Amino acid sequence: MSSNQDPAASAVASRYEVAVLVPCYNEEHAIAKVVGDFRAALPEATVYVYDNNSNDDTAAAAKAAGAVVRREPHQGKGYVVRRMFNDIEADLYVLVDGDATYDAASAPQMIGKLLDDRLDMVVATRIEREAKAYRRGHRTGNLVTGLVTHIFGRAFSDILSGYRVFSRRFVKSFPVLSGGFEIETELTVHALELELPVDEVATPYYPRPSGSASKLSTWHDGFRILRTVLRLYRAERPLSLFGTGAIALALVSIGLAIPIFITYMREGLVPRLPTAVLSTGLMLLAFLSLACGLILDTVTRGRREAKLIAYLSLRAPGEERRRS
C-alpha cells in the first residue's frame, strides 16, 4: 500500500468486491480522468465503462486508462444502467457519470457510510465548486425534488445526482424501467416507496473538462423527468391520484346541481336537461374514478409486496462476505 493511499479505501477493498459503474456517451475528453480518479480512490475496485454508441474515442480512452470497457447498443442512460445492474456481480456498486464532474475521493466516505449504517443507497448531494458547474436549467430541474417530496414523502436534497453507492440487494432487486436520464428519479422513488434505509453525503461538484459537452437537454429531458414523476405517481399512488380526481369531479357536479336544486325548490321549475345530465354524469365519473383508484391501489400493494420480497431475499450490506 502506497503512503498516500486512503486507509478507508484499503479496508473496503480488502473485505468487499467493489464495482464502479460508468455509463458513457461521447466522453473522450473526460473518461480517462474519471477512470484514473476512481482507480486511485478505490485501488482494488474494478471500473466498468459501458459505451453507449459513442462516435468518438471514448472506449479507447477508457480502456487505455485501465477500465473494463463494454458496449450497450440501446441508446439511453436508463438502458445502460439496466444492463450494468444485470451483468455485473459485486458486493458494492458505485454509479457515476463519465463527465468528470463528480468527486472520486468521496467514494470511500460514501461506501463507509453505507456499510457503517447498514444502508442500501447513499446519494452524493452536489455542492458546486464553481458557478459554471451547474447550468441554469439543471439548477431549476432540481425543483423536481420538491415535487417528489410532496408526493412520496421525504426525499433527498438532490434527487437528480448521478453519483450513488448501492448495496448488492438494492441493485439486484431494482426493476429498471426508465430508458433515459429519468433513471435517477426512478431510483429515488423506488427507495422511498419500499422505505429502504438510505442517506446522502455532500460532495464537491466540478465543471466539465475543456472540450466536453453535456448530453442533457434542459427542456426535453426536464419534461421527461417530470413525466416520469407523474407516471410513478400514477403507478405508486393510484388511490391518491384518482381519489383527488374523484373529489374534483364531485365538487364540480355539486356546484352545477346547487342552482338546479334552488331553482326547483323556490320556483318549482323543472331544471334544464343539459345541466342536469352534465351534473349527473360528472358525479358518475367521480364514483368511477374512485373505484379505479381503489382497484389499482390493491394491484399496487401486490406489486410493492413482490418487490419487497425480492429485496429481502438478498443479504444485507456486508453480510455477503461475513457469511462466506
Image (tube, helix red, strand yellow):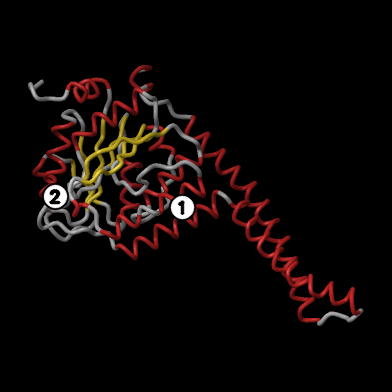
Q: Position of residue 76 (x, y in %)?
A: 31, 57
Taking the image as shown, residue 13 lies to the left or right of residue 239, namely: left
Q: Which residue is mark 1?
A: 147
Rendered position, 218 above or below 95 = below
Q: Position of residue 299 (x, y in %)?
A: 62, 48
- Alpha-carbon neighbours of circle 1 within 10 Å: few (<14), some, or many (≥20)? some
**Location of residue 20 by image quarter:** top left
Residue furthest front in the image: 266
Q: Which amino acid, mark 1?
A: Leu
Q: Is residue 129 above or below residue 168?
A: below
Instruction: Tell me the residue that label 2 is attached to.
Output: 30
Instruction: Find the residue positioned furthest to the right.
Output: 268
Q: Assign a secondary structure to mark 2.
A: loop
Q: CA separation, marks 1 and 2?
A: 32 Å
Question: Which part of the image, by quadrant, shows the N terminus?
Answer: top left
For the point 26% across and 29% down, which residue is it? 109
